[in-house]
Amino acid sequence: MTAHPLAGDTQTIRARRTGSAESRLLPLALLLPGIAVLLAVIGFPMLYSLYLSFTNYTLTTARSFHFVGLNNYITLLKDPIFWQAFGRTVLFMTLAVNLEFLIGLGIAQLMAKAIRGRGALRTIIMMPMMFAPILVGFMFKWAFNDQVGLVNNILFSLTGRAHIIPWLVDVPLGFIALLVAEIWMSTPFMVIILEAGILSLPVEPFEAAEVDGASGWQKFRMLTLPMVMPFVYTAMAIRSLDLARVYDVVRIMTDGGPGNRTELIWTYVYRLSFSGHNFALGSAMSYVTVIISFLFTWYLFRNVLKSRWEGRQ
């Protein structure tokens, strides 16, 4: 007997479907170990922290804590130190991101015009990013020390008068010192992103503008800046997320003091959770901060998509 020709076609179709199903399931099977690790390392702690934020959990009530609803969030909204730390964090983020953008854009413009030594310049510019934030905190804590600090010694060398300026104790000066340390450490990231954006721009519009007699400022304002905005928003979004959780530098340089005068959100979370042993209130504050950071990041990424769409039109 001879096999019917359609029978072979049916078997081939079934084999293809089986192979297709296996090919679709293989990537998921390969990703499962990574997903399991992420759920164990990130997912469970986040869900457990969310649960703790609705309880009265402290180290003294670890065995008898109970559900208290929104009491921690209400307490948080009535806490003046939280609002001071929140406002100070927003101000710190705004100043740091914008100053890093301005400085980074200027350096990126100069590096993009460099003909020789661009690789060496990139290496030098990126050096501050190689230092751990804790090391940067110790370095600038020494630099702004009122007795033996580098800054006061430079002022003495320039003026010939002894300057004992309490940089890390005075209210605005401590904030400025933290800002300088963060800008020094993170501006190289902005430089690299913006330089990549500038180097990727097409040359035809600039050649046409030069033929029309446009000045350097006009080419920058009308061509470079609008076309590089997607890179700007991306860099700002990443830096905003970093600054929303800044902790190491502040912890080392001022520890939020003196008297909570340089307290930021995450140093206050640490103080509540580990120094005050109030893990429930600290968890509630962490989630409020995460939600605010998410909304701010969503706004920036919406501008990224909008600028990219406008660039394609």
Image (spheres, rainbow, N blue to C red):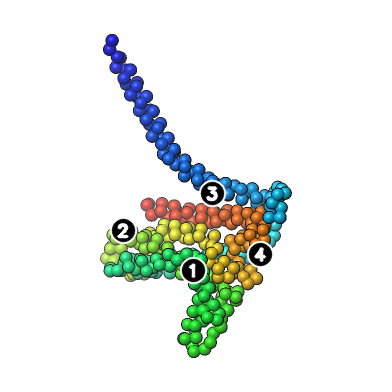
What residue sits 32% from the left and 65% below the top?
A: 119
Kindly identify the amino acid type of the residue bearing the numbered disc 1.
Val
**Marks 2 and 1, the one that precedes in the sequence:** 1
- The answer for how far apart the CA atoms under marks 1 and 4 are is 27 Å
Q: Are marks 4 and 2 in contact (CB under 8 Å)?
A: no
Q: Nearer the viewer's eye, disc 2 or disc 3?
A: 3
Quadrant of the rendered structure where residue 83 is?
bottom right
Label 3 Cα neighbours within 10 Å, binned few <14 / some 14-19 / many ≥20: few
Q: Nearer the viewer's eye, disc 4 or disc 2?
A: 4
**Marks 4 and 3, the one that precedes in the sequence:** 3
What residue sits 65% from the left and 62% below the top?
A: 275
Horizontal and vertical percent position of residue 268: 62, 62
The reply to whether residue 99 is visible in this rendering is no
**Marks 1 and 4, the one that precedes in the sequence:** 4
Q: Is residue 147 left or right of residue 208?
A: right
Horizontal and vertical percent position of residue 33: 47, 42
Q: Which residue is mark 3?
A: 42
Q: Which residue is mark 4?
A: 81
Q: Which mark is residue 202?
A: 2
